[in-house]
Amino acid sequence: MPDERGTSQVPEERTVIDAAADLLQTLVDWLRQEAEALVREKIALPLQKVGLTVASGWAAAVLLVFGLCFIAVGLLILLAEWLTWPGALLAIGGVLVLGSVIFTVLKMRSMQR
């Protein structure tokens, strides 16, 4: 309502628009918190568990490979005592070539089906 100078004063009370804006802000804050909790519960924690599982699997695989390398060196030394070094290398090479031929034949048969 205009005062003596002819200017209107804005009442100090909250308007309906202010109340609606506050309500919308409260709704946005609540949705943001719910989305954050949902992402943390349904996405972040399972991804962390998968990551730890994969890392543990890689660690186990690396240990297995190192162990197999040491066993292979030990067997090579043992075989070299029995067959001499050239004979041991020939025997190991022959086994590896035979294994690759078998693998290739089996893979070709499975691909042709």
Image (tube, rainbow, N blue to C red):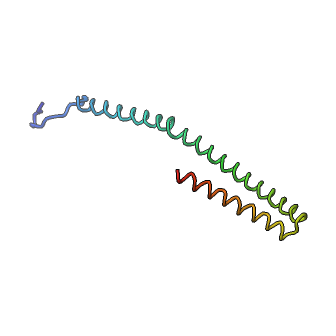
Query: In this rendering, is residue 48 above or below 105?
Result: above
Q: Quadrant of residue 35?
A: top left
Q: Nearer the viewer, residue 58 or 21?
A: 58
Point 45% across, 37% down: residue: 36
Query: In this rendering, is residue 25 above or below 74?
Result: above
Q: Nearer the viewer, residue 80 or 23?
A: 80
In the displayed structure image, the side of residue 111 where residue 73 appears, left or right: right
Point 31% across, 33% down: residue: 24
- The quarter of the picture where the N terminus appears is top left
Q: Quadrant of residue 10?
A: top left
Image coordinates of residue 80 in percent, x first then y, are 87, 65
| Total number of numbered discs in the rendering | 0
Q: Nearer the viewer, residue 94 or 18?
A: 94
Query: In this rendering, is residue 65 above or below 44?
Result: below
Q: Nearer the viewer, residue 17 or 6?
A: 17
Which residue is situated farthest in the bottom direction here?
86
Query: In this rendering, is residue 103 above or below 34?
Result: below
Which residue is situated farthest in the right direction here?
81
Point 83% across, 71% down: residue: 86
Image coordinates of residue 73 in percent, x first then y, are 81, 61
Image coordinates of residue 21 in percent, x first then y, are 28, 33
In the displayed structure image, the side of residue 49 where residue 3 appears, left or right: left
In the displayed structure image, the side of residue 109 where residue 18 appears, left or right: left
Image coordinates of residue 28 in percent, x first then y, are 35, 35
Point 73% across, 55% down: residue: 65
